[in-house]
Amino acid sequence: MSVPRQRQAPTGGPRQDYVDAFDDFDTFGGLDEDDDVFAPRNGGPAHAPGAYASAYAADPYASVTDWDPDTGVGVPSETDEDAAPTGVPAQTRGSKGRTFTGIAAAAVTTVLAVVVAGQVANGRDDAAIGTQSATDQARDARDSGASAKPSASAGVATLTYSEAMAKRYPLSATLKGPGKFDAVPGVAKAPGKGQKYTYRVDVEQGLGLDGELFAQAVQTTLNDNRSWAHGGARTFERIHTGKPDFVITLASPGTTAEWCAKSGLDTTEDNVSCDSAATERVMINAYRWAQGSKTYGDHMQAYRQMLINHEVGHRLGYNHVTCSKNGALAPVMQQQTKFLDHDGIHCRANPWPYPGS
């Protein structure tokens, strides 16, 4: 805002001084043409026991629609407040000058009051519009399913269950952990009415893997109708304390080998998993969980589902089998981490006991 010019107190009558008091102001309240004291401030709102027996006799893999025909692998079905006024008030000389200046100031104040009142009224309307805009934005966000809360970690997107299950994670094929386990806390109730199996999820310390994701994968996979819960025959419940029917354990390759050796099984040759039947533990090799296998390629979620179903299948009493028809889906109890093709027969990758369900 321009600083008013200092002038000599007038010597004429009050009428002339009254007029002079306005000679630096325009018709809307005494502002120079370039001044905009009441301009709006910047800012505002910016805008998830027995063998297979008859299970495979009728080729339950015949009708499957959710697999990639080329690869044979299943495709797994986010104002500053106004600054204080600046400038130096105009100075006057003499009592008469002060009197006339006071008269002029009163007149100017009256004009400015009218301008300010208009601007405040406009500002109030603008604020109301801004509030309505924010309300509309919140409603749009709610209707679209977007979260109204800010991200817990700015700039870091939270993965859905399927996204997390589709990722590979770093872990060495030669890792040997401490052999100490932590049970994943919490429970997951059995959703079905069939024969109930209880299990606990243990994760070896120091793996750097998401134990809760692993636990969710076990519960979700086992209770899928394509899995061992098929047709309501079984239902699976995760517990945290008490005596479970088995403990499904995510462990380093070295620790997996130790626990599998207790049941006479060697997992070191192909770095695989096992059901250590002489113990309570179903061992899932963390290297395979993190990195997958050549047989499944980039289909990590399907591979992880197969790992869970295959090893728990052993715990339920099922033995190894292979597909017997060229181009057929591999039975889930085939050692799919090691091979898909055998004896000139090409088998297609399959993570489910009942894939057509």
Image (cartoon, grey):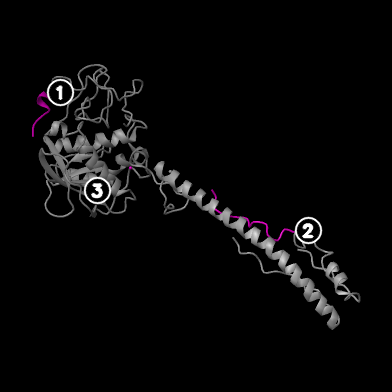
Secondary element type, mark 1 = loop
Residue 261 is situated, as x and y percent measured from the top left of the image, at 18, 43
Residue 320 is situated, as x and y percent measured from the top left of the image, at 16, 29
Q: Quadrant of the C terminus?
A: top left
Residue drawn at (13%, 25%) of the image: 55
Q: Residues within 10 Å of mark 3 (few under 14, many from 20)?
A: many
Q: Quadrant of residue 121?
A: bottom right
The residue labelled by disc 2 is: 27
Residue 98 is situated, as x and y percent measured from the top left of the image, at 81, 79
Q: What's the amino acid at mark 3?
A: Thr
For the residues bearing labels 3 and 1, Cβ distance under 8 angstroms: no
Asked whether, in this view, residue 298 is left or right of residue 221, the answer is right
The residue labelled by disc 1 is: 56
Secondary element type, mark 2 = loop
**Region in magenta:** 35-55
Residue 128 is situated, as x and y percent measured from the top left of the image, at 53, 54
The residue labelled by disc 3 is: 255
Of callouts 2 and 1, the N-terminal one: 2
Of callouts 3 and 1, the N-terminal one: 1
Of callouts 2 and 3, the N-terminal one: 2
Q: What's the amino acid at mark 1?
A: Tyr
Majority SS type along the magenta span = loop
- Above or below, 78 relative to 183: above
